[in-house]
Image (tube, rainbow, N blue to C red):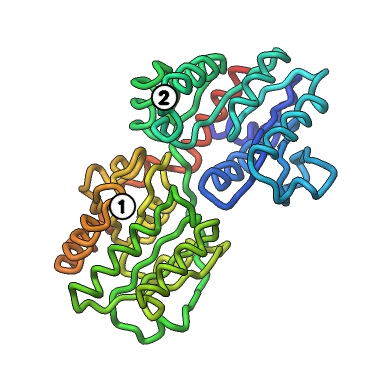
């Protein structure tokens, strides 16, 4: 078995089909992190791997990057990027036998794959609650997703929701996590600070709902005498909205927007508490990274992932999605029982084996081998 593993590791498989990873817009979230985990893993086994995107990206020389020649597309919205990448996908692979692994804009990749007789595996990143809100969308997504050769989702709850709402079968592959080498980081305004230190990591968007988090901390100042500092790491379109709220509610000494940080994981160990405030997720990587850092967690009970990661509250605290009053109450609960929730955070690390890097990436390998 050991020899077999070594053989697979050092002798890449030459296959007739081109393995094409399709993601028109590479941003800074968990989807992209999982994409690069997969790319770095697959390059050990296959020689014909391509990435189709319209975003700026640096890749290992063994991966062939296919993107627009013009920089015009780099800052366009996701729809335009999806259209140009679909055109590129057609032009570049129209005479080739391909397996498309779609991480984004699955409708585009499915339609083109069916026209071109390619195999297509789609990875869904957010539960269907987000985008299926009427009969037409229900019919459209059910019909199109059913045309894919295989559907991958990243949580058991996600699988159940997809089965219930669209009557579709899917395969669960958890987000793989790796042990990072933490950098020794410092934040000046936290030096010698003894109050409650809270962190949130995520894009500044409606999905991540940092506004609910800010509203709950406003109640801490108005109703309690608790000293705290909240740091939010991430960038996005809601930065102006959040800054306005911070200024209007005199929170500038308590809340800091640090912007995007490439090594955000390394900041976690500086804090007492991680809060995820999302309206919806797939399987949030930041919760897994917080568990790796043994930091206590309060999370919205949003679809899907948090309840699964926190084992229904056994490994952390869940609050009602979008309810800043409930989050405020859960914050008080944490503050009164810090020792208890620190013990839960220590316990959480023992359950991370479910998300083992090699174990979950091997599941991708198994699926790919079915279609090549």
- Disc 1 element: strand
Helix, strand or loop at mark 2: loop
When asked about the image quadrant of residue 196, the answer is bottom left
- Please provide percent x and percent y for residue 182: 50, 66
Residue at image coords 38%, 49%? 278
Q: Point out which mark residue 134 bears.
A: 2
In the rendered image, residue 255, in percent from the top left (x then y), is placed at 39, 73
Image quadrant containing the C terminus: top right
For label 1, the crowd category at 10 Å Cα-Cα, with few meaning under 14, some 14 to 19 and many 20 or more, is many
Q: Is residue 212 left or right of residue 97?
A: left
- Against 57, residue 92 (above or below) is above
Q: Say whether marks 2 and 1 touch (CB < 8 Å).
A: no
Residue 223: x %, y % from top left: 18, 72
Mark toward the start of the polypeptide (2 vs 1) = 2
As drawn, is 194 to the left or to the right of 367? left
Report if residue 3 is visible in the image: no
What's the mark number on residue 156? none
Residue 74 percent across, percent down from the top left: 73, 49
The residue singled out by tag 1 in the image is 299
Mark closer to the observer (2, 1): 2
- Is residue 186 positioned above or below 43 on the image? below
Q: Is residue 5 left or right of residue 274?
A: right
Q: Residues within 10 Å of mark 2 (few under 14, many from 20)?
A: few
Q: Is residue 297 visible?
A: yes
Query: Image point 20% across, 63% down: which residue?
Result: 334
As drawn, 64 above or below 199? above
Mark 2–mark 1 Cα distance, whole angstroms, equals 28 Å
């Amino acid at each position: 078995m050991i020899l077999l593993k070594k053989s697979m590791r050092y002798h890449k498989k030459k296959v007739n089909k081109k393995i094409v990873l399709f993601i028109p817009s590479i941003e800074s979230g968990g989807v992209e992190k999982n994409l690069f985990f997969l790319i770095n893993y697959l390059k050990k086994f296959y020689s014909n791997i391509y990435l189709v995107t319209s975003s700026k990206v640096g890749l290992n020389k063994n991966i062939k990057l296919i993107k627009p020649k013009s920089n015009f597309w780099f800052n366009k919205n996701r729809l335009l990027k999806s259209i140009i990448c679909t055109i590129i996908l057609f032009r570049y692979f129209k005479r080739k036998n391909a397996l498309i692994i779609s991480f984004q804009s699955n409708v585009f990749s499915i339609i083109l794959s069916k026209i071109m007789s390619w195999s297509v595996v789609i990875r869904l990143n957010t539960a269907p609650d987000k985008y299926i809100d009427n009969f037409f969308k229900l019919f459209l997504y059910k019909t199109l997703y059913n045309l894919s050769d295989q559907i991958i989702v990243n949580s058991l709850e996600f699988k159940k929701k997809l089965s219930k709402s669209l009557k579709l079968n899917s395969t669960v592959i958890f987000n793989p996590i790796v042990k990072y080498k933490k950098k020794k980081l410092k934040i000046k305004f936290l030096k010698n600070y003894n109050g409650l230190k809270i962190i949130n990591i995520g894009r500044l968007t409606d999905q991540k709902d940092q506004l609910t988090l800010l509203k709950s901390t406003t109640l801490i100042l108005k109703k309690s005498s608790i000293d705290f500092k909240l740091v939010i790491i991430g960038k996005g379109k809601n930065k102006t909205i959040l800054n306005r709220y911070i200024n209007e509610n005199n929170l500038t000494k308590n809340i800091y927007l640090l912007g995007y940080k490439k090594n955000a994981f390394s900041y976690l160990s500086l804090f007492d508490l991680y809060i995820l405030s999302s309206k919806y997720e797939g399987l949030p990587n930041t919760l897994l990274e917080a568990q790796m850092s043994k930091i206590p967690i309060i999370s919205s009970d949003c679809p899907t992932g948090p309840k699964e990661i926190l084992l229904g509250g056994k490994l952390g605290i869940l609050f009602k999605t979008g309810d800043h009053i409930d989050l405020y109450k859960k914050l008080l609960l944490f503050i009164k029982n810090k020792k208890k929730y620190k013990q839960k955070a220590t316990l959480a690390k023992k359950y991370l084996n479910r998300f083992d890097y090699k174990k979950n990436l091997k599941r991708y390998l198994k699926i790919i081998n079915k279609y090549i």
